[in-house]
Image (cartoon, grey):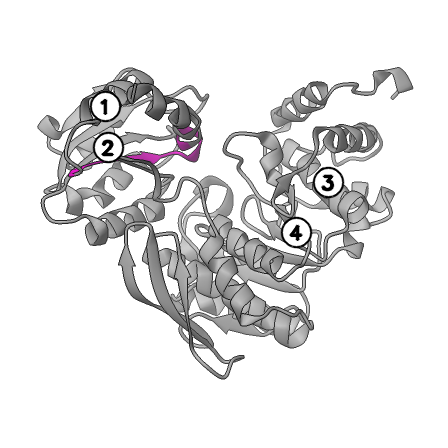
Amino acid sequence: MHAEERFVEYKQALDWLHGLLRFGQRPGLERMQWVLGELGNPERRVPFIHVAGTNGKGSTCAFLTQMLMEAGYSVGTFTSPYLIDFRERIRYNGSMIEEEDLLQLANEVRVLVDRCEKETEFGSPTEFEVITLIAILYFARVKLPAVVVWETGLGGRLDSTNVVIPLVSVITNIGLDHTSVLGDNLVDIAGEKAGIIKPGVPVVTGERRSEVLAVFHEKAKQTRSTVYEIGTHFAGEQVEEKLGEQQFRYRSRLRRNEETYRLTMNGIHQTDNASVALMTIDILRNYFSFLLEDEEIFRGLQQTRWPGRLEIVSPRPLVILDGAHNQEGMEALAGSLERLLPEGARLHLLFSGLADKPLSHMAETLLPLQSRIESLYVTTFDFPRAAESEMLHDAFHTGGWEAEKLEAVPDWRAFLLSWMREKQSAKADDWLVVCGSLYFIAQVRAFFPTTVEEAGE
């Protein structure tokens, strides 16, 4: 590549990155390994905590990041997908990578991407691989954090993040998502996620099913790794919950005493995620001389916010966002609403999802709530894979919903505006829960801060 072909502006670099989407998902680590080899293996200079799993990866990464930062550690975080800005995926101490840094690193990586395509039989690295490479360079050269919380993109074994040897490997749980790539049963998917287990590296898991744990233990036996299971080596038990907070008791084999912690997030699954994060911290304290005081851990958990997970964006009228974008997510949402909804409150749902998700099964998952739900609105949003509202309407109907409860909304923005105006003066017993695809939730979230003010004029 000639010097004059360098990207001069951040936007050019971003367009190039997104342009790599045409290479799709191509499982395999050979392109990553080739490029990292050419760069002198920068990934070996950074300590990682590698997090895989179907659900709960994001929350677990957020808990870990916040606890370590509270204790004064500098922390890199690599996550996906992003909600509003692409740079959310690569953070240092909670702040997004600077546009200037991303531009410089994209220029450097681009040369190697072109060479990989021309000089090897592996072809061009994919978009996700290139983002992963940029993250590694950012952490290894620009920022040098004490530790990096490193979330897998898809699966584990062949995921482009799987080029690191971490301090701890974390597998939150296994569910049926991305079945076309990872296999259509739990044991196959567990085999893919178990691919992040490395020789001698301890493994923490929030998975409870014996057939899945058997896969982890089999792999751990080959690598001589210790597996720490929820319910056996550590456990978190919810004590009480109300909208906007919950408390739970935690105990672990690596601690003398039980401890009670407070979360500002709802859902029993968050107790699990926080417990998995706590066990990971216990391992870092016991075996890697990390120093975290009990108060720092307590504060870290309490301060963790996770946008789009039972997130209250308007107190009155009450509007809650939840990125329940697959069946497990829907089950968690249904369970939380059943526990949190006060007597006499009227529940309304606005749902939008991606066409490639098991929509009618997701609709079935919400059936236990049907008696409490006044109305269920389905809508589409601006995204290539978004399902049309007619398709969603049919999916909910197929999933067992009564037609009179369902309504297709052509324009969700107009719907929300009129909802905010009408319900502004209403009593606080109308709950609107906006749920579905994280991409949809991101758009609704960006829309909110302005609308609430406008509606209140």
Q: Secondary structure at mark 2?
A: loop
Marks 2 & 4, CB-CB < 8 Å contact: no
Report the span colored magenta: 429-441
Circle number at residue 162: 4
**First-in-chain label (2 vs 1):** 2
Is residue 226 within the magenta segment?
A: no
**Mark 3–mark 2 distance (CA, rounded to whole Å):** 44 Å
**Mark 4–mark 1 distance (CA, rounded to whole Å):** 46 Å
**Mark 1–mark 3 distance (CA, rounded to whole Å):** 44 Å
Which of the two marks, 2 or 4, is nearer to us in this view? 2
**First-in-chain label (4 vs 3):** 3
Tag 4: amino acid: Asn
Tag 1: amino acid: Trp
**First-in-chain label (1 vs 3):** 3
Circle number at residue 419: 1
Which of the two marks, 1 or 3, is nearer to us in this view? 1
Q: Position of residue 19 (x, y in %)?
A: 65, 22
Tag 2: amino acid: Pro
Residue denoted by label 2: 317
> Nearest the camera: 188 or 110?
110
Q: Position of residue 261 (x, y in %)?
A: 42, 66
Tag 3: amino acid: Leu
Marks 2 & 1, CB-CB < 8 Å contact: yes
Residue denoted by label 3: 133
